Image (cartoon, grey):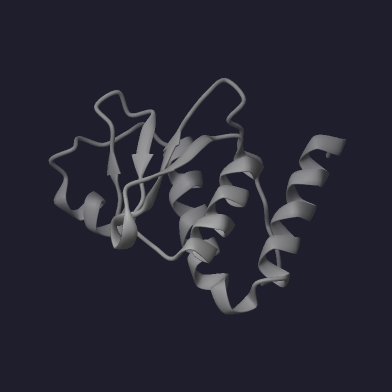
């Protein structure tokens, strides 16, 4: 394991440990990101896929739009996006504010097996 992989695992573990009450949000979003990085994108008409990820993807398959959430949860998701190298921004107003993530050349995935 190189230093980059170790740093990513350490940051992910810290994010979870420091936010145990938001553990489910972080881990479920991480699962979505890993799935998107591991597999080719399914058709946008795949209703099961949309229900599973609770997110919609851009036409090019490089963008994912997450569901609206609180400002603190968005902060956690911004940190998670940083770990995986996704470009990210919050969009929308009020209760509709949510994150939009985009794959870019720096986006990476390492196999992480943490004892949660």
Measuring from the top left, give residue 4's x and y in whole percent: 80, 36
In the rendered picture of this protein, how many numbered marks are placed on residues?
0
Q: Residue at x 65, y 72 (%)?
A: 19
Of the 4 image quadrants, the one containing the C terminus is bottom right
Task: Residue at the far front: name it.
Answer: 94
Q: Residue at x 28, y 32 (%)?
A: 58
Res 85 seen here: yes
Measuring from the top left, give residue 63's x and y in whole percent: 37, 33
Q: Is residue 78 above or below residue 57?
A: below
Left or right of 90 in this view: 5:
right
Q: Residue at x 26, y 36 (%)?
A: 42
- Viewer-proximal residue among 91 and 47: 91
Left or right of 115 in this view: 76:
left
Q: Is residue 108 above or below residue 54?
A: above
Measuring from the top left, give residue 41's x and y in whole percent: 32, 34
- Viewer-proximal residue among 95 and 22: 95
- For residue 94, which quarter of the picture? bottom left
- For residue 22, which quarter of the picture? bottom right
Res 38 seen here: no
Task: Residue at the far top: name it.
Answer: 105
Left or right of 116 in this view: 95:
left
Q: Residue at x 83, y 39 (%)?
A: 1
Measuring from the top left, give residue 66's x and y in whole percent: 36, 50
- Viewer-proximal residue among 34 and 96: 96
Q: Is residue 105 above or below residue 114?
A: above
Q: Is residue 33 above or below residue 31?
A: above
- Viewer-proximal residue among 112 and 12: 12
Task: Residue at the far right: name it.
Answer: 3
Task: Residue at the far bottom: name it.
Answer: 21
């Amino acid at each position: 394991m190189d230093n980059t992989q170790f740093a990513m695992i350490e940051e992910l573990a810290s994010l979870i440990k420091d936010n145990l009450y938001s553990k489910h949000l972080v881990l479920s979003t991480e699962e979505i990101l890993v799935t998107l990085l591991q597999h080719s994108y399914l058709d946008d008409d795949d209703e099961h896929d949309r229900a599973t990820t609770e997110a919609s993807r851009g036409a090019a398959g490089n963008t994912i739009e997450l569901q609206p959430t609180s400002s603190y949860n968005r902060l956690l998701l911004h940190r998670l996006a940083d770990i995986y190298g996704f470009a990210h921004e919050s969009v929308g107003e009020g209760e509709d504010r949510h994150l939009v993530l985009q794959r870019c050349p720096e986006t990476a995935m390492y196999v992480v097996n943490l004892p949660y």
